[in-house]
Image: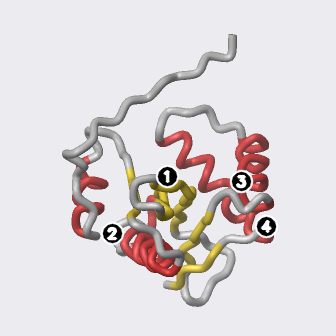
């Protein structure tokens, strides 16, 4: 297995899995909008996307992760948000997520980030275990809130 950084040339490979990821979280597919969204992130350097591929096949995607940059005013350093991670159903239990997160962690270190953040569903026990095995710990210092912005 190899982990590579996605470029615009990978959009055709990435988009179907990104759509499956969105559907996993209850969203409608919207393949064209999903592709446009990914294309904008890559063109504008607004995210970093890593792809997991088999050693001998450039046409099969095992999984992906997408990170967004943020910053900490208190530490005066970069923070990376591991916003999306998904592994193809037929590639699970092959440590694909571990390989993707190791590459993400390396990139975070290389960019002098102070930390990486990740959120997942409260009931996603598999993800909790995976994140904790990679060194993530539950944030007991801060409580997070969200403010939905309506499009009225």
Q: Going from the N terminus, do you reach mark 2 or mark 1 first?
A: 1
Q: Position of residue 143 (x, y in %)?
A: 28, 36
Residue occupying the point 54% across, 40% down: 23
Disc nearest the viewer among 4 and 2: 4
Q: Quadrant of the C terminus?
A: top right
- Say what secondary structure mark 1 lies in: strand
Instruction: Identify the residue position indicated by label 4 in the image.
Output: 8
Q: Are marks 3 and 2 in contact (CB under 8 Å)?
A: no
Given residues 40 and 143, the one toward you in this image is 143
Please tell me which residue is depicted at 70% across the width and 65% down the height of the picture.
13
The one of 47 and 97 positioned closer to us in this rendering: 47
The mark total stands at: 4
Query: Which one is earlier in the sequence, the residue at label 3 or at label 4?
Result: 4
Mark 2 burial class by Cα count in 10 Å: few <14, some 14-19, many 20+:
few
Is 149 situated left or right of 119 in this image? right
Name the quadrant containing residue 124: top left
Q: Is residue 151 above or below residue 61?
A: above
Q: CA distance from mark 3 to mark 1?
A: 13 Å
> Disc 2 marks which residue?
93
Q: Which residue is mark 1?
A: 83
Residue extending farthest top = 152
**Label 4, label 2: how far apart the Cα atoms are:** 28 Å
Distance from Cα at disc 3 to Cα at disc 4: 9 Å
Element under disc 2: loop
Which circle's residue, 3 or 2, is located before the other in the chain? 3
Q: What distance separates the C-alpha of mark 2 from that of mark 1?
A: 21 Å
Residue 143: assigned label: none
In the drawing, what numbered circle is on residue 38?
3
CA distance for labels 1 and 4: 19 Å
């Amino acid at each position: 297995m190899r982990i590579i950084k996605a470029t615009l040339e990978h959009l055709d490979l990435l988009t179907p899995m990104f759509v499956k990821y969105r559907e996993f979280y209850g969203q409608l597919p919207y393949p064209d909008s999903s592709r446009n969204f990914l294309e904008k992130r890559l063109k504008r350097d607004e995210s970093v996307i890593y792809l997991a591929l088999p050693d001998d096949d450039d046409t099969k995607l095992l999984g992906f992760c997408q990170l967004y940059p943020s910053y900490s005013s208190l530490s005066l350093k970069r923070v990376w948000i591991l916003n999306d991670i998904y592994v193809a159903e037929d590639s699970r239990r092959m440590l694909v997520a571990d390989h993707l997160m190791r590459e993400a962690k390396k990139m975070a270190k290389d960019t002098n980030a102070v930390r990486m953040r990740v959120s997942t569903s409260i009931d996603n026990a598999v993800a909790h275990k995976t994140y904790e095995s990679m060194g993530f710990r539950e944030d007991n210092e801060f409580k997070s809130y969200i403010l939905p912005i309506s499009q009225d």
